[in-house]
Image: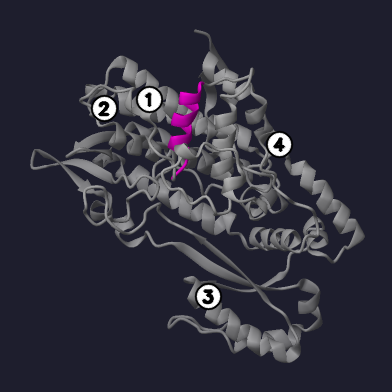
């Protein structure tokens, strides 16, 4: 079978098979060349012009490396000892393609555009593919990813079988059911449902192929060191153990610091880049431009119309509106005119919003109009509750698959596994949500009323015990 390779800025060489090449060459996947990975982040960091196409290739590459570790390292992984060669090949095939296609449904401007998506029930999707049947909700990019994956098995240009599409879709969508075709892949001594949960966590979890690629890729193209971590050492220390009937991701004791570094890299990228004050301000502008219908931004439910959308489709509409109304939200965005940030308040939404409401009330006296941009992301992908075995979940549980990460170590010569949050000093104290709010005032309004705004602002400063005001 032919093997193809390309050069990549992050992983140097990415190889792929004939089957993978057919998927990559399909127009439904090629559209990702025209969807930027970080939308308007390039307005702040000029190098951030990389696309979801290169990220998806990188995620496939990382998923392949993870699969090699999980499926062939007999010292670290129980899967390497119990799966047949055919089962290993199939698992690696599906893991790589799920990682390749996990972002296939992203619209222009990524998450900001999801407000324009139709109801889920309007998409031509097999409802039997989904375990949670909330068909009245608004569609999300993950639903469009499934729509595109389904499309890869339709018509004369199909590159996947219908069964393959259903399996891949089930690995990238949190509400998908485990397909019957998945169960048939494995022998009777393998628990297919729990194995499915584990493989899902390789695509979306606390140690997943998506995140492992985008942290390095975004950091590289933006030109900052915050997202760097030791990918090789981290993967080489991963494994799988079995606890009862559950397959559990493990990491050796010597790899814990690499994992901590990786987790902290994500925190730093959010705090320093993704939640940068100007980036968030511009995203607010875009959201208002869409909400006030300054540009027509309707996301079609038809797959052929959807795959024709590109960033440039809407950028030109924003430019047209900006020329007609320079002080519209579109005009401010395309002219790169950020508002003046008055404060960044860390805390949950209630804490931040209470501070904002009080500040806005006082500013109303001088007819100044601040606005709040609230930012939040989970530091770790977990939901508090019960895991599949009925035990309380800790910080290192994936919200997507409810699969824990444990540390494998030897104590007095006895091999043991311990939950990551009971082992890592860093993660015992450092797993809260990344949550903050930025308070802005439009620049021309700030310049006009600067003295009054600053006088009122001082009344809302609440210094820490060790903090003092500088002249």
Q: Answer with mark 1 or mark 4, whichever residue precedes in sequence.
A: 4
Q: Which secondary structure class fits the magenta region best?
A: helix
Q: Relative to 295, say whether 329 is above or below.
A: below
Q: Is residue 308 left or right of residue 248?
A: right
Q: Answer with mark 1 or mark 2, whichever residue precedes in sequence.
A: 2
Residue 288: percent from left, percent from top: 72, 63
Q: Residue at x 78, y 42 (%)?
A: 312
Residue annotated with mark 4: 34
Q: Is residue 200 left or right of residue 462?
A: left
Q: Secondary structure at mark 3?
A: helix
Q: Nearer the viewer, mark 1 or mark 4?
A: 1
Task: Please tell me how crowded label 2 is: few (under 14), some (14-19), or many (20+) other residues with Cα within 10 Å.
Answer: many
Q: Would residue 166 be counted in the magenta stretch?
A: yes
Task: Please tell me how crowded label 4 is: few (under 14), some (14-19), or many (20+) other residues with Cα within 10 Å.
Answer: some
Q: Relative to 366, say whether 86 is above or below.
A: above
Q: Nearer the viewer, mark 3 or mark 1?
A: 1
Residue annotated with mark 1: 91
């Amino acid at each position: 079978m032919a093997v193809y390779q390309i050069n990549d800025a992050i992983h140097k060489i990415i190889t792929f098979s004939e089957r993978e090449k057919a998927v990559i060459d399909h127009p439904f996947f090629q559209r990702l060349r025209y969807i930027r990975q970080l939308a308007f982040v390039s307005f702040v960091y000029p190098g951030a012009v990389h696309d979801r196409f290169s990220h998806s290739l990188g995620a496939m590459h990382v998923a392949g490396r993870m699969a090699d570790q999980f499926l062939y390292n007999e010292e670290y992984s129980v899967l390497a000892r119990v799966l047949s060669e055919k089962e290993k090949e199939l698992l690696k095939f599906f893991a790589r393609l799920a990682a390749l296609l996990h972002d296939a449904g992203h619209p222009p401007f990524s998450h900001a555009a999801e407000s324009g998506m139709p109801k889920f029930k309007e998409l031509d999707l097999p409802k039997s593919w989904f375990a949670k049947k909330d068909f009245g909700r608004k569609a999300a990019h993950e639903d469009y990813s499934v729509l595109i994956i389904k499309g890869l098995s339709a018509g004369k240009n199909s590159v996947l079988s219908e069964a393959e599409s259903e399996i891949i879709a089930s690995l990238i969508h949190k509400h998908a059911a485990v397909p019957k075709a998945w169960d048939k892949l494995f022998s009777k001594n393998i628990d297919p449902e729990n194995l499915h949960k584990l493989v899902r966590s390789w695509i979306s979890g606390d140690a997943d192929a998506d995140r492992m690629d985008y942290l390095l890729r975004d950091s590289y193209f933006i030109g900052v060191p915050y997202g760097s971590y030791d990918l090789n050492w981290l993967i080489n220390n991963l494994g799988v153990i079995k606890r009862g009937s559950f397959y559990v991701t493990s990491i050796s004791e010597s790899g814990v610091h690499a994992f901590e570094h990786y987790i902290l890299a994500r925190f730093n990228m959010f705090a320093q880049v993704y939640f940068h004050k100007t980036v968030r301000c511009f995203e607010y502008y875009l959201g208002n431009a869409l909400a006030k219908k300054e540009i027509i931004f309707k996301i079609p439910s038809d797959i052929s119309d959807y795959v024709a959308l590109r960033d440039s489709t809407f950028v030109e509409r924003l430019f047209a509106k900006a020329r007609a109304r320079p002080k519209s939200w579109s005009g401010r965005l395309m002219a790169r005119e950020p508002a003046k940030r008055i404060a960044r308040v860390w805390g949950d939404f209630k804490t931040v919003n209470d501070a904002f409401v009080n500040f806005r009330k006082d500013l109303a006296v001088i007819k100044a109009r601040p606005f709040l941009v609230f930012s939040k992301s989970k530091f770790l992908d977990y939901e508090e509750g019960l895991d599949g075995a009925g035990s309380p979940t800790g910080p290192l549980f994936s919200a997507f698959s409810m699969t824990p990460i444990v540390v494998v170590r030897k104590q007095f010569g006895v091999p043991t596994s311990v939950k990551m949050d009971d082992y890592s000093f860093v993660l015992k104290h450092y797993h809260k949500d990344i949550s903050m709010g930025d308070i802005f005032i439009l620049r021309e309004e700030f310049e006009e009323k600067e003295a009054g705004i600053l006088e009122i602002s001082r009344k809302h400063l609440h210094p820490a015990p060790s903090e003092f005001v500088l002249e």
